């Protein structure tokens, strides 16, 4: 049985040339990265591609990583950049957007779940990202500000408007046919 390793140790060992130590980081963060990538890209296939590319980016740029910080917030920026670049490219391909699976149950009925997925898919990418990170992943305003590199007040304002747009979309779905 392999001994558990801390992120800092894995990063140090990678920097010393032990490539296998990076597997610790992939194993620890892959599920989370896939969930975030799915929320940003809108489908599983693109999410898997973007997560893999982001892990490669992280490995290649590990020397630039600030060891005084946590790994995942740094990695998330790489993942987010990959996803937004990939999302622009995938919009040109037909049939690349499939419904999202929620990271946590948010609504009660299948009809409400369908409406939430449909409404989230209609939101601009920035709104979609904020709502998923705040309400499904439970990030604080401070975590959002740091990881998205925007002021806390801007996070609060954007989230307020994103919630209003989501509520408006859900209101339209309630009155429409199922």
Image (cartoon, rainbow, N blue to C red):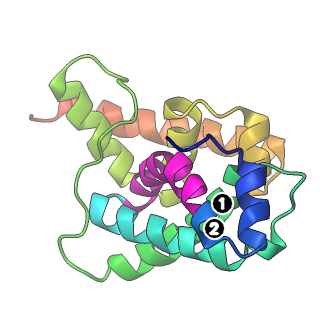
Residue sitting at x 40%, y 62%: 41
Q: Determine the residue located farthest toward the front in the rendered image.
A: 1
Residue sitting at x 43%, y 48%: 35
Which residue bears the numbered disc 1?
75
Per the rendered image, the range of residues in magenta is 22-41
Would you identify the image quadrant in which residue 172 lies?
A: top left
**For this rendering, which residue is in front, 42 or 31?**
31
Q: How many marks?
A: 2
Q: Determine the residue located farthest toward the right in the rendered image.
A: 68
Quarter of the image that includes the C terminus: top left
Residue 37 location (% of width, % of height)? 45, 57
Asked if the stretch drawn in magenta spans residue 50, the answer is no
Quote the CA–CA distance across marks 1 and 2: 5 Å
**For this rendering, which residue is in front, 108 or 153?**
108
Report helix, strand or loop for mark 1: helix
Few, some or many residues within 10 Å of mark 2 (<14, 14–19, 20+): many
Asked if the stretch drawn in magenta spans residue 29, the answer is yes
Q: Which mark is residue 78?
A: 2
SS assignment for the magenta stretch, majority: helix
Residue 173 location (% of width, % of height)? 24, 35
Dots 1 and 2: beta carbons under 8 Å? yes
């Amino acid at each position: 049985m392999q001994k558990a390793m801390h992120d800092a140790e894995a990063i140090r060992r990678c920097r010393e040339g032990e490539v296998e130590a990076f597997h610790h980081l992939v194993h620890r963060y892959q599920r989370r990265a896939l969930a975030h990538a799915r929320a940003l890209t809108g489908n599983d296939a693109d999410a898997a591609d973007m997560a893999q590319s982001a892990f490669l980016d992280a490995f290649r740029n590990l020397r630039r990583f600030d060891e005084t910080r946590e790994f995942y917030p740094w990695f998330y920026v790489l993942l987010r950049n990959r996803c937004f670049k990939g999302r622009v490219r995938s919009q040109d391909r037909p049939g690349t957007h499939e419904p999202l699976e929620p990271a946590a149950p948010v609504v009660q009925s299948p009809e409400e779940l369908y409406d939430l997925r449909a409404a989230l898919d209609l939101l601009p990418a920035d709104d979609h990202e904020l709502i998923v990170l705040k309400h499904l992943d439970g990030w604080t305003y401070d975590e959002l500000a740091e990881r998205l590199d925007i002021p806390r007040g801007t996070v609060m304002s954007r989230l307020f408007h994103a919630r209003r747009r989501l509520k408006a979309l859900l209101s339209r779905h309630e009155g429409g046919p199922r």
